[in-house]
Amino acid sequence: MAEGKTAASQLSPTIKTLAAHTGFSIGTISKALRGSPVVTEQTREAILAAAKDLGYQANARGMALRTGKTYQAAVLMPLTSAAGYEWDGVEYTQILSGISQALDGSDYQLSVHGYRSFDDACAIARRVADQKLSDGLIFSGVLADDARVAMLTESGFPFVSLGRCRKPLVYAHVDVDNEWAAHAATARLIAGGHCRIALINADRRFSYALDRIDGFVRAFREAGLEPPLDLIAGGDLSTRFGRDSTLALQGLPQPPTALVCVNESTTLGVLSALGALGLRVGEDVDVIAYDDINVSAYFSPPVTTLYQPIEVLGRRLGEFLLRLMAGDDAAQLTEVFRPQLIARQADNLGGRLDRPDP
Amino acid sequence: MAEGKTAASQLSPTIKTLAAHTGFSIGTISKALRGSPVVTEQTREAILAAAKDLGYQANARGMALRTGKTYQAAVLMPLTSAAGYEWDGVEYTQILSGISQALDGSDYQLSVHGYRSFDDACAIARRVADQKLSDGLIFSGVLADDARVAMLTESGFPFVSLGRCRKPLVYAHVDVDNEWAAHAATARLIAGGHCRIALINADRRFSYALDRIDGFVRAFREAGLEPPLDLIAGGDLSTRFGRDSTLALQGLPQPPTALVCVNESTTLGVLSALGALGLRVGEDVDVIAYDDINVSAYFSPPVTTLYQPIEVLGRRLGEFLLRLMAGDDAAQLTEVFRPQLIARQADNLGGRLDRPDP
DNA sequence: TCCAATAATAAAAACGTTTTTATTTCGGTT
DNA sequence: AACCGAAATAAAAACGTTTTTATTATTGGA
């Protein structure tokens, strides 16, 4: 009974609604909205006014179908399903937060793909690129020889990685200067009089784990010492790993007198193990940690850290991806952050570090 | 020069490609793929074989445009931009992990929308629903009177909340039995001989903060005691808040002898403050904490917790949303989890709790 | 005064689906 | 033998855009 128009006006307005209201054709409407120079200023204004009036919002699916774009920015996120590893990957909240902020003003939506293993991550990356599930991709946990980086670089699919692989490929990335940081931490401990220093590290297949070993080794070499390679532990970055590896290391004939920890999750496990062994941090043992979620200040005692606000990295990841999708050159979109050393009491060995050199 | 077919075969195959290969019309192809009963078993098989052969994958954008669905499940995620609050919201990694797992086999993609304030969250929820940016929505941090719940319930947009509001509305939700948990923790401490018990709680506008106060108060009432309302602190759930509020409480004329902490982030701050004041946890002061990321076991000393694997809640959120989007009744999609008390040494007050009753 | 060139807009096609409507085929009735 | 109904499939329309092509109106020049 009621004419169609009435019913239609209930639904969200389309470009056709605008056409009916303004009297222009849908093509003209589209051009006006996209800012094409072929429409008169006067027409554009009329159309924009009508669009505002009716609360017109372009239908993302229509655009997506026609243009082939998805207006999605995808992130690969590690799933932490195992019980006891709940703290694993907590930094992802920060990363996603940063990316989300970067994408905020843009036309892009943030979509998250969970993966269970590296192979899983590769398969998903391939699927995203092949099926064009998104217009760009962000991921972390880069291996020294990372299949995702290789594959996506070759196919030209836009992506930004948090971390660098060890192949001479050109691609957009954000990273922390892990070699520098490990060197700084180790050198500081060596200066404090330590020579049995442990490195609680990630698994060696990760590129950043190798970087850290490099920095660790360099600090010893520069001091004229042989690096204690037996004190390098590699594993998942869980609290449990931090605890277990510390217990194992302290059971050695020549246990470490200081530890460099690769993130705060493991650091908590390290502190827990040291406490259980009756070792006082800052007196019996020194600890320096990588700081990813800025919580080390609250450990007892507070731990000296290399701090890098990870959310800032996340924001940069998002910014880079936007620029990449806008056509910028990947070679220009790289940044390596150098973390900041925040000295707290726990690596001071009872004030020894402050003691003037003899 | 080369015929069009060759070029087309490079791109991902569409329903038209299948039509050309099998000789059927695109309508029949579509019906066969969707499992419509009108096509012969024989044709279906032929079509399915061809689809497999060519690696056909339905184009999500085409489907989306035609059906009006988006095949997106959206999650509202709080952004934690302030420096010093990096640990805020770390549990979101777990939540997203759980949701992602639930969505894994489905046709739905997980998309994340960050928000900066409650009003922001409301605005985004409204936009998602109005513009149909997704087919369903998940969010947490429910207020006692939550505009999102009210708005979405009224509009009929599918959503699942982590937490319940205090209005008599029917909607899908997952929650923790916070009243029970606060009661359990408080009663345990009262049984241990405490009567000056503090509750380090979230802001009172959150529904779950009120639930916890209810349980806290009930435990005192049941013991014939007046609840110490002056010892209820409310704030953001940061580590800093845990520390600051503990320092403030311990400065009172009659400071608390025990604390119930509302999550692990604040707990770390509480422990940090107690350590700074020279108070030994488990001897001078007792602590029971809500356990959200299962890290309390590594605190020094380990803290007794009410443990609920939050990833399980996340998975249930995803499952409920899928069923809701499939047309299930929201009234049936509710679940309240009761956390598990994991007794550790730190709420024992030097063994007092284990002492047989006189 | 007329033509060509230009500007502005309209019309049509296309993206890849699903769904509705139309057509064909075939076995069974009358 | 003509017809009917059902079954299977084909054809067409539609979702909301963008882009290409076509049309109309306007201007300037000879």
Image (cartoon, coloured by chain):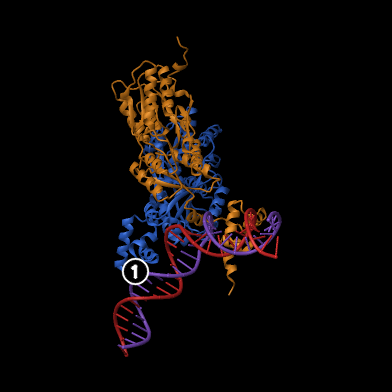
Chain colours: A blue, B orange, C purple, D red
- Residue A351 percent location from the top left of the image: 38, 34
**B262 displayed left or right of A166:** left
Q: Is residue B59 above or below residue B1?
A: above
**A339 displayed left or right of B29:** left
* Residue A267 visible here: yes
**B101 displayed left or right of B46:** left
- Residue B312 percent location from the top left of the image: 50, 36
Give the amino acid type for the residue marked by disc 1 in the picture.
Val
Q: Is residue A85 above or below residue C9?
A: above
Q: Is residue B167 above or below residue C2?
A: above
Label 1: which secondary element? loop
Q: Residue at x 30, y 63 (%)?
A: A46
**How many other residues sit within 10 Å of disc 1, few (<14), some (14-19) or many (≥20)?**
some
- Quadrant of res A248: top right
- Front residue of B184/B333: it is B333
- Residue D9 percent location from the top left of the image: 62, 60
- Residue B74 percent location from the top left of the image: 44, 46
- The residue where tag 1 is placed is A39
- Front residue of B259/A70: it is A70
* Residue A328 visible here: no
Q: Which quadrant would the N terminus of chain A be assigned to in this image? A: bottom left
